[in-house]
Amino acid sequence: MKVLQVNVRLHEGGAARVALDLHRQLLSSGIKSRFAYGWGEKGGKSSIEARVPYSFQVGRQLQVASNMLLHRVAGIDCVPPSGVGRKRLIEAIQWADVVHLHAIHSYYLPFEWLVKELVRSGKPVVWTAHDYWMLTGRCAFTEGCERWHGGCGSCPTQNNYPSAYFDFSADQFIAKRRLLAELGSRLHVVAPSEFVAKAIREGLPRLDVRVIPNWIDSEFEAALHSVQLNRAPIDLGNEKIKVIVIANDLSDPTKVDRALVNQLLGMPYIEVHTVGQNSPFAGAGVINHGRIEQRKRMVEIVASADVALFTSEKDTFGLVMIEALACGIPVFAVDSFAAREVLGRLGLVSMRRQEILERLAKGRPRALLCKEQCLNSSAQLLSVYGAGSAVNAYLETYEGCVR
């Protein structure tokens, strides 16, 4: 079995972590895998490419920058890859038994160009829908907009990622449906959650869709065994309750509820720790750790907190929830489709904002916080969200494609 993974980034963001860990898991199982990614830091090569076997960059800085500019005007990537990246991608598509797409939007692969290459190759395609992009005329995240049910157009959310100044979403909706039809029965879709699968089945009823939840990546799991996770039942007493907030972009209002965090900061016994870029929070009660690349360091920072706060309204899964639980700390998640489904599989619940504030009342012992919204062990979580069952499910999907 030979599999080509394709994703916009090599290691940044939830989709990249899933795609990269799947690539590594396949290689460690003796299965041939290659990883084609769009661009790294500042549109150039990823800083970790040398450490990822059989990975290569598709985009080039000028091409990525051109697509970024064109997309912000018209909402479409127009400039195809060129040079070495183009050649290596076409060769890899021809080499593969299965082409596995992840996030393919965002400035490096015009969809029409990619579909033509896939159709020309005749290879089966697995597409993991990490977001809603395949359903809409432009948006990766709908932010509650339901206009894709009627073909998009008159877009009320032009700033939704990836944003555009002019609205061509209706035209692009039609074009995308036509291109998906060209892939036909060769296309097999995977969703990380039931609610995403439900939306895809409603919008694209002819597609084969199955659910394979995301999982704790192998580097994170290894770090769990190398870091001392101190979850001893202690009374906070006069200590501050350490609340950790994690997001790739902390300034994104659909990822982080700034008002709720500021309410917590108004409590003298709360200390907010953030992980991610562009933190809008500052002051005596805030510790900004910035972006953390090393998984061991990530485990250390998360495990040192008392509570993880998850307020995203747009996540299609929410890896940070299961990562925090794996570190042995409770997750207080604002109610959303993702929080409801991901926590529900573990017998935990999402909450109302007011309930979160009430549960973080002064002087509550950390042991009580954990009892309310935590797991007994990492093993309990890994039995549901471990890599083993997910990778096996993907292997079954690949094998079903090539029969």
Image: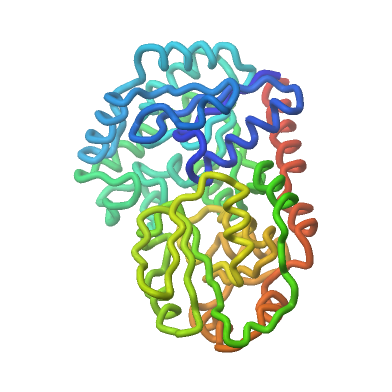
Image quadrant for the C terminus? Answer: top right
Residue 17 in percent (x, y) is at 56, 41
- Establish if 364 lies above or below 123: below
Q: Is 287 placed left or right of 172 in the picture?
A: right
Q: Quadrant of residue 186?
A: top right
- Establish if 358 lies above or below 350: below
Image quadrant for the N terminus? Answer: top right
Residue at the (55%, 51%) spot, across then down: 196
Residue at the (56%, 78%) spot, across then down: 241
Residue 134 in percent (x, y) is at 45, 39
In this view, the residue in front, 147 or 370, is: 370
Q: Is 72 placed left or right of 4 in the picture?
A: left
Residue 13 in percent (x, y) is at 49, 45
In this view, the residue in front, 114 or 215, is: 215
- Establish if 328 lies above or below 173: below
Residue 186 appearing in the image: no
Residue 70 in percent (x, y) is at 23, 33
Residue 360 appearing in the image: yes
Q: Quadrant of residue 179?
A: top left
Residue at the (39%, 49%) spot, across then down: 148
Q: Quadrant of residue 233?
A: bottom right
- Establish if 106 lies above or below 109: below
Q: Is 352 placed left or right of 303 in the picture?
A: left
Q: Is 152 placed left or right of 401 in the picture?
A: left
